[in-house]
Structures are given as C-alpha cells and as structure tokens.
Image: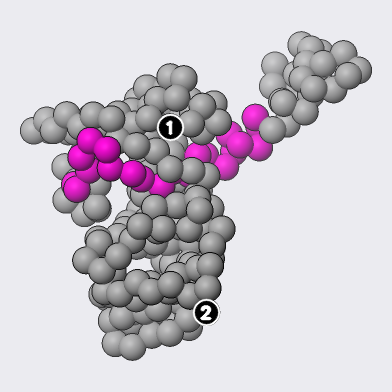
Amino acid sequence: MFTGLIQHVGQVRAARAIGEGKRLTIDVGPLAETLAVGDSLAVDGACLTACAIAGSRADFDVSGETLSRTTLATAGAGNRVNLERPLRLNDELGGHLVQGHVDGVASTGRVDRGRDQWRVEFAADRALTDEMVPKGSVAVAGVSLTLTHVGEGAFSVSLIPTTVAKTTLADLAVGSAVNIETDVLGKYVRRYLSRLADNPAGGLTLEKLRDAGFA
C-alpha cells in the first residue's frame, strides 16, 4: 500500500524483454539505501518487486499483464519515473490510500501552465471516470491528486508548483500517456451498488440504500 506522495524521481537505465515480460533497471537514487531484494516499489504508480540491487540501481521484472495495463510497456532507457516506497503502519497518510494496482491508462488532452498552478485535462475510458468524483482522489503516474472536474471519459486535476517540481508530471504534454489508479474506496462502493442494482429481487431501492448505510 502506498500514499501517492513521490519520494524520488528515478531514471530507467535499461529495459530488456524477458519472455512475455520485461526487466527494467532503474536508478532509484537514495531509495536504494533501504531497498532490499524482494521489497516493493511503486514505479509510476505500478507496484513492482526488486529482484536485484547494485549500488543505486535496482532491477524489476514486469509481467506481461502489467505491461498490457500500464505505460511501463513503452518505458526505456532515459525515461524518468516517479518512485515511492510502501506505506508502513506507523507512517503519516499524507496523500490517499494507493494500492499500486493500475486500473488503466489516460491520455493528456490539455496542459495549462499557470504561474501558481497547472490545470491538466485527461481523456480516459468511461470505466475509469465512472469511478471518479469531483474533489475525490486519483493517482496519476503514482501521484496522489484531487479531481477538480469529472465528465464522461474525461477528468482534470490541478498541480501546485511543488508537485510539478518533484514529480515527472512536469514533463506532461498533449498526448502523454499516464497510469491511472482510481480511489479503492470508490471502486468497492461502485461494485456493491452495481450488484444491488443488478439483483433481480427488486434492483436498487431507497430501502436497500438505507440498510447499507448509504441513505
């Protein structure tokens, strides 16, 4: 489990295919001091396991399933990536609960670079935006952000100068692809309500919502 607060921006040093997957060598900088083989690290929002460490560089095996769902499929030498170590039980939760399980990829539609903040708009599958709410949380390339607008197949966020300076979101341009993880609480609520609505015994009713504590 992660918080979406990026601890270091690393750089991919090498990428090579291994069967249906891929092995990434990433310079993780100071995070290498506490990283051991078998430990987890969120790389642009995707939870990966370190399989080898040498100095400040760590190797990560990426499965074919992960490649099919994330931007790591196109990650290569020179790419910058957001990195975060897992949350410990006694850590402060400064962002929001992020699992490191990417739900899909969004495309950057517009970037307005203001002096005090950036406004960024994304296009995404309706399945992703249906799990978002304005003022709710979303992880974009592993960064915990607040949604400022949500539409059908589109959403937007605002970036403060600190976020721009300390993450790869400074590199965003029209067409940039980013990993998206929606709020885990919203996913469970949506699934529960969908099951109620699909129940042949009456579907979704106000009485059922009251019984479940939603009304």
Q: Secondary structure at mark 2?
A: loop
Q: Residue at x 58, y 34 (%)?
A: 186
Residue at the limit of the structure toward the left, as seen here: 115
Disc 1 packing (10 Å; few <14; some 14–19; many ≥20): many
In percent of width and height, residue 147 lies at 38, 30
Q: Is 156 in the magenta?
A: no
On the rendered structure, is 5 left or right of 39?
left
Tell me if residue 210 comes above or below residue 97 in the rendering. Answer: above
Disc ID at residue 148: none
Q: Amino acid at mark 2?
A: Gly
User: What residue range appears in magenta?
Assistant: 170-190
Q: Amino acid at mark 1?
A: Ala
Per the image, the residue denoted by label 1 is 124
Q: Residue 74's quadrant in the figure?
A: bottom left
Disc 2 packing (10 Å; few <14; some 14–19; many ≥20): few
On the rendered structure, is 95 left or right of 214?
left
Q: Residue at x 40, y 25 (%)?
A: 154
* Mark 1 and mark 2: Cα distance apart in space: 33 Å
The first of marks 1 and 2 along the sequence is 2
Residue at the limit of the structure toward the bottom, as seen here: 54
Tell me if residue 22 comes above or below residue 35 in the rendering. Answer: above
Disc ID at residue 38: 2
Tell me if residue 198 comes above or below residue 165 in the rendering. Answer: above
Q: Residue 204's quadrant in the figure?
A: top right
